[in-house]
Amino acid sequence: MLFLMVLVFPSFVFFGVQGYNRFMQGEHAVARVGDQSISPQEFDAAQRQRLDRMREMLGPNFDPKIFDTPQARAAVLDSLIAEKALAQETAKANVFVSAQRVIGVIKSIPAFQQDGKFNYERYKTLLGAQGQDEISFEQRVRVDLVQQTLLRAIADSSFVPRTLAANMQRWAEEEREIRELRFRVEDFLPQVKVTDAAINEYYTTNKAEFETPESVRAEYVVLTLDAVASQIAVPEGELRAYYEQNKSRYGRPEERRASHILFTAGDRGTAKDKEGARKIAQEVLAKVRANPADFAKLAKQYSKDPGSADKGGDLGFFGRNMMVKPFEDAAFSLKEGQISDLVETDFGFHIIRVTEIKPAQLKPFEEVRAEIETEYRRQQAQKKFAEAAETFTNTVFEQADSLQPVADKLKLQIQVADTVTRQGIPPRPGTPPVFVPHMIDALFAPDAIKNSRNTEAIETGPNTLASARVVQYRPAALRPLDEVRDQIKTLVDRAEATRLAKEAGVKKLAELTAAANDAGFGKSRTISRSKPEGLPDEAVKAIMRVPADKLPTYVAANLEGGAYGIFQVLSAKMPAQPDAARNEQLARNLQQTIGNGDDAAYVDALKAKYKAEVLRSDLAPEKPVSSGSK
């Protein structure tokens, strides 16, 4: 034991809890695609990102347990494998996206806009809050656009015959004139007489419905990076020193607005070859220098940049590292209103004109002090978290009869969850998750229930450790019959009334089939598959399934709330004139659906091409069960 402690505890001090977990789990790849592998850290990061997206989308309805299943984890890994396969294929196919397109996409993201316009300060702040820098984010956008370009080419090649769309529109808009006779459950409730024997039988047969699940009242403490950060002293001198060392982060860098005229070579370019394009560019440059006021007109006439030509070559404002280097160097060397010589880039030849300059501005220390303090605390907390995590882990283990010692040592708050079941508890918005599956298993372990000992320190999220203990255990229990008698009576009442309603409806349908009778039916109305007028799918299918040459006739279907409906189908009518706009929309939807299927098939083919392989059996997708006989 002493030998093991000598091995284990130094590793906690040096690596921290997360590093120790990675050490114990190994650094083996979880999957391989071609010559690239997917590490456990990359997989964990993708899983956290997915949870963060779902948490943001669902808000208080977010339940992490839904995404903590073998199927969900396999789906995350499968998406990573698809990305790796696409990345290798786009590199091999030399798919390229221009810097201008990347900039355009980033500027169009609503999160980076203020008053409908791209705001660089907001852009920088949001990236910083997510721990990203501009270069890595822009590279990620470029990669996504490259992959979308490849997939769009596959999807756009899908073909939908117009006759198919037209036939589907006719099928969706075929009309049926009907009359309805409805047998409502409420109308049969007065006929139901529920006996005590029936209530007792239901209670005995369905005991699981009336059980309260086993649960515990639990105390717990949570150690987070924010908790460590809140206890860090903040010397004013260090904040000012940090400000001086990182002034570039607290100012708006210089931005320039420029217009350009692009000349390219190739079949659809300015000229067939590079020298021809250069010659034309030089001729246009002479015209621009002779009359700078014609720049926009000449850009519309000559520029081969589809994104800016119609706007007179205007590229809007941009900062450093947002354009290819030769273009950026030229643009940032010009004065306002000045026109460049020919600038050659991978895209072709450019004539650049700087139209406006926003000089760099630095925010005063007082304005950004709170931001610097938050950043300072977080940086110091990152350094101290491993030490705090070791203290947390050791204390909850060594003084396992109470959480008070660890709460006192690390200045944490002991919290209480009154009813924790084996399904956990709904997460509270704005609080870190605690009752993850691993924690639930630990809380309901026999030793934890019997002796009320602290659980081990459990990593419930990034930079988050928790420990809990059972204060009170409540075993599963059957609620007494007297307590649920009224509830059972309501259920049995309704079930019997539903049976009587359907029985009466079936009898009436038989009578109508033998001798048609309009008594009891409502006014006629028209429905279609696209306009069901409130009828459930089962009823619409029954009505539309009747051959048009067999009308009038009667059909029946179950309705909402247990009701039973009989429908007199009087006539069928096809739409006289197809709606051209609707037909076009339907064709686009069909093409998109087929295109999505083609995309999925293409990605599957790429996985096979690059020999994608899942190396961890617990992350492999489930194989479909064969229904064939041996």
Image: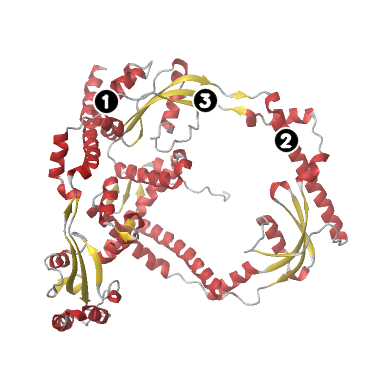
Quote the CA–CA distance across marks 1 and 2: 56 Å
> Residue at coordinates 79% horizontally, 67% vertically from top-left?
552
Q: Which residue is mark 3?
A: 215
- Disc on res. 490: 2
Q: Is residue 100 above or below residue 473?
A: below
Tell me which corner region of the image, top left, top right, bottom left or bottom right, holds residue 620: top left
Mark 2 vs 3, N-terminal side: 3
Distance of label 2 from label 3 (alpha carbons): 28 Å
Residue 285 position in % (x across, y down)? 15, 80
What label does residue 134 carry, if any? none
> Would residue 308 appear left or right of 204 to someone viewing this image?
left
Discs 1, 3 touching: Cβ within 8 Å: no
Label located before the other in sequence (1 or 2): 1
Q: For mark 3, does the 10 Å Cα neighbourhood hold few (<14), some (14 to 19), or many (20 or more) residues?
A: many
Q: Which residue is under mark 1?
A: 390
Q: Nearer the viewer, residue 175 or 554?
A: 175
Q: Position of residue 340 (x, y in %)?
A: 13, 73
Image quarter hosting the N terminus:
top left
